[in-house]
Image: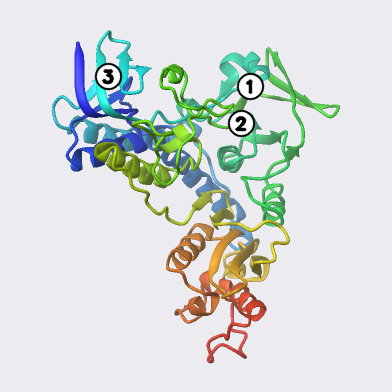
Amino acid sequence: MLHDCDVAVIGAGTAGLSAESHARKNGARTLLIDPDFKGTTCAHDGCMPSKLLIAAAEAAHVARSSGALGVYAEPRIDGPAVMDRVRHLRDGFAGGVRKTIAELPDGVTLKARAAFTAPGELALDTGDRVRAKAVVIATGSAPFVPPPYRVAGDRLLTNESVFELEDLPESLGVIGAGIIGLELAQAFARLGVRVAVFDAATSYAGLPEPTGAVLRDALEREFPLHMGVKPEVTLEAGGVRLGWNGQSAVFEKILVATGRPPNLDGLALENTGLTLTEKGVPLFDPDTQQCGDQPIFIAGDANGARPLLHEASAEGTIAGRNAARFPEVAARRRKVALAVTFTRPDCATVGVLPEEGDPETVTGTADYGDQGRARVMNEAHGLLRIHARRCDGRLSGADLVAPGGEHLAHLLAWAIECGMSAGQVLEMPFYHPTLEEGMRGALREVCRKVGEPTPWHRKDLRDPGD
C-alpha cells in the first residue's frame, strides 16, 4: 500500500510529536511513523524515572544526614517499594504521552519501521511505502554498550533497563561519569547500594574546571570515582568483576552509561544523497534543522547536538514548520542553551562558556561553601561562575555546582535571554536569606571587571548571606 503525505515524521518521541503537530498546524498532511509508540524517552527511560529514584534517595539522605542539625534518624529503605513507585509513576507519565498519541487524527499514525529508498520515499517493514514532500528524522538515541562490557550478560544495565529492577542491588559498578551515570550513581548510593564509578575520561557531567573539581569533591564523600581508567570486565558466579590499575571489585550489577548516540541504524541514509559525518549523522543547519539542500530535516537526539527534552521540542517545532513550508525554509533563533544535572548539589551549564583565557570575556565567582542560606541548610558546598562580555557586561554564560542549582541556572538563563548586564541583574529584587542572593558576589565581580556601576544602594554593602 502507498501512503501519500506532505510531511512524514519518523519517530514519536518528543521531537517527533512536536514536528508532527507543527507541520499539521501549518497545513500539512502528516504521517507519524514509529515501531512502538511507547512514549517519549524522557517519560519512559530518562528524565522522569530517574527523578523518581532521586526523590527517594533524597529522602533517605536527609534522614541520614540530619544529625548535623541535632535531629537523629536512620532511614529504613524498602527497595521493592522504591522501585515499584518509580515504575508506577513512570508508567503514568508514559501513559499520558500514549494518550496524546491516541488522540491524534485518524490515519496519522503508522506503526512500522521506516527506511529511505529515496529522499522523499520510505519503505516500511510492513511492506507498505510512503511518499512525502518532506521527511523529518526524529528517531532519538539509544544507549551504547562498548563490546568489553557485553560479557556481563543479564547483569548489565542501561538507562532503559535499570528501572525494571524489582529490588535495589547490593552493589553497582557504574561505567561513565556523564549526566546519567552520576545522577543514578548518587541515587543508588544514597539508597544504601555500594557504588563505584569508572570513566576513561577525567571530566564530570561535562563541566569545565574548576566547577568539575567541586562536583567531584562533593560526590567522593558518598562513593569512589575512578577516573582515567578502562576497567577490565569478568563475569563470575557472584557478579561482575571490574579490574583497574592493579585493583578489582565485584559488583552484583553494572550500569553502563557511556552515552546515547543517535538512533539512525536501519534508516538507509545512503539512499538520501546526504553528506554524513563520520558518526553517520547527516550534516544539517542547526537554525533550520534542514539536512543539506534536501527536503529532509532532523530534530532532537537524532542529530546529537543538544540531547535534552526542551531542545528536542524546540527542534521539532522548527523542523515541522520548515518541512510543511518547504522549500520556503526559515531560520529561527535558538534559545539560550541550558543543561542541568540533578546530582546533589545540582550542577548546570548556561549559555556559552568561554575558552580559558578568552580576552573578550570576564568571569565572576561565588563560593557556595560559605553562603549563608546554604550553611543554614547544611548544604554548604559549591561554586558559581558567571561569564559576561568585557565590552558591556552583558551576561553570556554560567557554570555552577550549588544547592538549588537548577533554580539558579534558570534565573541566569532568563537574564541572558533578556540580554541583561550584570548591573541590571543586580537591580532586581533579592530576598534574604536565599540561595539566589549568593549570586550577587559574582555579579559584582563582573561589574568591577567591566567598569559597570553597581546599584547605588548595594555598592558599599556586603549583605547578609553573600
Question: Counting residues from the N terminus, which is met first, the one under dot 2 or under dot 1?
Answer: 1
For disc 2, the neighbor class at 10 Å (few under 14, some 14 to 19, many from 20) is many
Mark closer to the chain start, 3 or 2 = 3
Residue 44 falls left or right of residue 409: left
Residue 69, relative to residue 47: is it above or below? below
Residue type (three-letter) at the residue carrying disc 2: Thr
CA–CA distance in space, label 3 to label 2 = 30 Å
* Residue 197 seen in the current view: yes
Disc number placed over residue 111 in the picture, else none: 3
Q: Position of residue 464 (x, y in %)?
A: 59, 82
Q: Is residue 73 visible?
A: no
Instruction: Kindly give the residue lying farthest to the top in the view shown.
Output: 127
Q: Is residue 24 above or below residue 246?
A: below
Sequence order check: which comes first, mark 3 or mark 1?
3
For the C terminus, give its image quadrant.
bottom right
Q: Callout 3 environment at 10 Å: few (<14), some (14 to 19), or many (20+)?
A: some
Looking at the image, do the residues carrying marks 2 and 1 touch, with CB atoms under 8 Å apart?
A: yes
The relative height of residue 169 versus residue 50 in the rendered view (above or below) is: above
| Side of 356 relative to 442 (left or right) | right
For the N terminus, the image quarter is top left
Q: Secondary structure at mark 1?
A: loop
Quadrant of the image occupied by residue 439: bottom right
Q: Nearer the viewer, residue 40 or 137?
A: 137
Report x, y in % for residue 86: 42, 36
Q: Is residue 103 above or below residue 432?
A: above
Looking at numbered disc 1 in the image, what kind of residue is underneath it? Pro
Q: Which residue is mark 1?
A: 146
Which residue position is annotated with label 2?
Answer: 258
Tell me the distance, in whole angstroms, between the alpha carbons under discs 2 and 1.
8 Å
